[in-house]
Image (cartoon, rainbow, N blue to C red):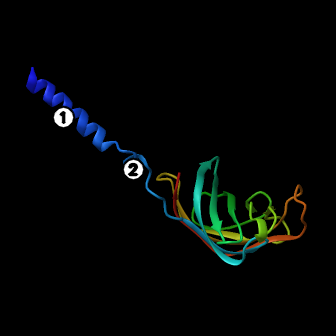
Amino acid sequence: MKPLLLIVLFSIGIGLYSCTKQDAKPPKSQPNVTDSIYDMCFHGGVCNYYARSITYKGGIFSFDAYDFIDSGTRSQGEEELNMNVKVITTGRVFLSVSNNAETSGGGFGALGAPYSGRTDANDTGYVVFTQFDSINHLASGTFSFKTYAVPYSPYTGVMSIVTHGSFTKLTW
């Protein structure tokens, strides 16, 4: 009876040791979307986004990514990038109203008021898919575009200019 009790206690101890709070935390993810952006909050900075959601449904590849910005003593906020593009293979896709990209930001205090902008039919940008595999659920590519104030925005005109954008091995 004593050997059985020792085995049970030893097993419980190992179980408790291997499930510490530190082990339960997910590993910190690495940014997988980057760009250079000039907008109301970021005046020529580089964003390193973390993808929040990535989907491919009905031939539409979409992702939503964010970058938390800490400007030291001035304020904090979030820059967000969304993209919805019809794609079936590698190559260039032009952005417009239906194939679109959107940028937004909020909570920046001294850095600027919340804003939102989307690509439109007048000045399209593009996405170049350098890797697109709907079977293995993997996409990589580059992008560049301008966004314009959305109808519900208190602003008008160009909201952001995005250059040198890239996404690497996004999986869904």
In the picture shown, does residue 116 fall above or below 142? above
Q: Tell me, yes or no, whether the two marked residues, 2 and 1, touch with CB atoms within 8 Å.
A: no
SS at mark 2? helix
Observer able to see residue 141: no
Image quarter for residue 117?
bottom right
The residue shown at (44%, 51%) is 26
Which is nearer the eye, 3 or 119?
A: 3
Which is nearer the eye, 103 or 43?
A: 43
Residue 114 lies, in percent from the top left, at 80, 61
In the displayed structure image, the side of residue 134 where residue 75 appears, left or right: right
Residue 15 lies, in percent from the top left, at 27, 37
SS at mark 1? helix
Q: Residue furthest front?
A: 73
Q: Residue furthest top?
A: 1
Quarter holding the N terminus is top left
On residue 10, the disc is: 1
Q: Provide the residue designation for mark 2.
A: 22
For label 2, the crowd category at 10 Å Cα-Cα, with few meaning under 14, some 14 to 19 and many 20 or more, is few
Residue 157 lies, in percent from the top left, at 88, 70
Count every numbered label the image shows and give the total: 2
Mark 2 and mark 1: Cα distance apart in space: 21 Å
Observer able to see residue 11: yes
For label 1, the crowd category at 10 Å Cα-Cα, with few meaning under 14, some 14 to 19 and many 20 or more, is few
Q: Which of the two labelled residues, at mark 2 and mark 1, occupies the earlier sequence position? A: 1
Image quarter for residue 34?
bottom right
Give the amino acid at mark 2.
Answer: Gln
Residue 78 lies, in percent from the top left, at 68, 62
Give the amino acid at mark 1.
Answer: Phe
